[in-house]
Image (cartoon, rainbow, N blue to C red):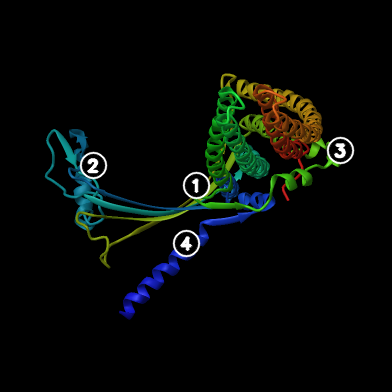
Amino acid sequence: MRKYIYSVFVIFFMGAIQAQEKELSLSMQEAVNYAIKNNYDNKTAVNNIEAAKKRKWETTTMGLPQINGKVDYQNWLKQQVSVFPAGFADSYSQIRQLSEFYDLSSLGIIKEIPDAPTEGLAVPFGTKQSVNASVTLSQLIFDGSYLVGLQSAKTYLKISEQAKEKTELATREAVINAYGNVLVAQKTIDILEKNKNVLQKNVNETQKIYDNGLTELENVEQLQITLGNIENNLNNAQRLKIIGLQMLNIALGTDLNTKVTLTDNLESLTLSNTNLSLLTEAFDIDNHIDFRIAQNDRESKRLLMRLEQSKALPTLSAFINYGANANSDSFTFFNGDQKWFDYSLFGVSLNVPIFSSLGRSAKTARARIELENADIKLQEITQKLNLQAERAKSDYQLSIENYETAKKNLALSERIEKKQQVKFFEGISSSFDLLQAQNQLYTQQNNYVQSMLNVIAKKATLENALNIPVK
């Protein structure tokens, strides 16, 4: 029984821990910081930087000493023979005389000395099996393309680092938009629930008035239509909140079913994101990530041109090796009495390109054109980034102005709607007038909510346009 209770307790405890792990409570800034560490794109960007570092070292090692070992084993299933002409008899006689003093077959020179030939001599040279083992040390002394490759590796690493910075800026904007959309959905739900309660009360009161014969059925039905539309919008807003939370989870880099509690509210975020000093922020294009990426792209094109030019230069390398070989008619290479013959070789290789039928010139010219295109692209991105900064400032200022206007219009539409309710129930105005006031109120409520989201989103866009780093 104790074991059973203990097992249940452990399962319950582990389940509680897992449940805690699947719950997050985040402010907007905390959500941004969380996503910078856990977002899928950011994780990939970090891995790309590590890969670029490895690639840089890989390029560096091409100019460092290289040591390679090699072992060759050969086994003739049927040996080749060499055929000597019949006129070789005199030399053949000398070989037979020599074989009386030296065991040529043991040296692996001639396996067997047959009788004197009459027409030709077919002799198998060598042994059936042989092993050759060697170690070679090689060193690149000069190669123009290697020097360019070292510079290119540094540029490639910088590209990966800049890509990570660009990804962080995009992640911040994506999280802010996703976080804001969830808050908008929740705010919309709150407003629609309030509108639904008011409309339901109006329908009930109008139904009682109709039951007493003091109003027309059309007034009841008109309010019921409006109530139905509100209920549909409410259901849709609830579904959108669920989708918005899942989109936020993707932006954060968590599982779709992770429960995320948002600790900020829409009103407070709108106030904290209303920062008019950003409108006077100086735009430093030299520090903008897109401009630096364009500069790095130009540098890569310049290095490609240098690479093509370097292929016209000579390359110089050297090597030294040491090896040993052994021969036998059977596999006796691991025996202690097996004879091994050492050898060693040193060499220097100089490769001088002389003529390529103008192929290298064509490649260099093509690389030079790519460099010119990169210069044109750099000029274009300069103009676009300046325009983008000015437009982002304008859009942000407009969002603040729209928010202030929407807040005033909401207050006005609320007063108008309340007056129309009083007039309607006093019999002074019709249901059509009340409907117009209600629709106007609902429109202003939606404008107000969207204006708050726009302030938050446009500020994030402006921060990216000004290249304000992620905090």
Pair 3/2: label in front: 3
Image side of residue 347 versus residue 376, left or right: left
Q: Quadrant of the N terminus?
A: bottom left
Which label's residue is closer to the chain start, 3 or 4? 4
**First of labels 2, 1 by sequence position:** 2
Sequence-wise first label, 3 or 2: 2
What distance separates the C-alpha of mark 2 from that of mark 1? 90 Å
Q: Is residue 4 visible?
A: yes
Residue placed under numbered mark 1 in the picture: 256
User: Which residue, given by chain and number where applicable, does mark 4 sit on?
Assistant: 18
Q: Nearer the viewer, residue 4 or 31?
A: 4
Q: Mark 2 Cα within 10 Å, few/some/many (few <14, many 20+)? A: few
| Residue 201 screen position, x and y as percent | 61, 38
Q: What amino acid is found at the position of numbered circle 2 in the picture?
A: Ser
Between the residue at mark 3 and the residue at mark 1, the CA separation in whole angstroms equals 40 Å
Residue at 58% x, 48% y: name it: 252
Q: Read off the residue under disc 3.
A: 282
Secondary structure of the residue carrying tag 1 is loop
Q: Outermost residue toward the bottom?
A: 2
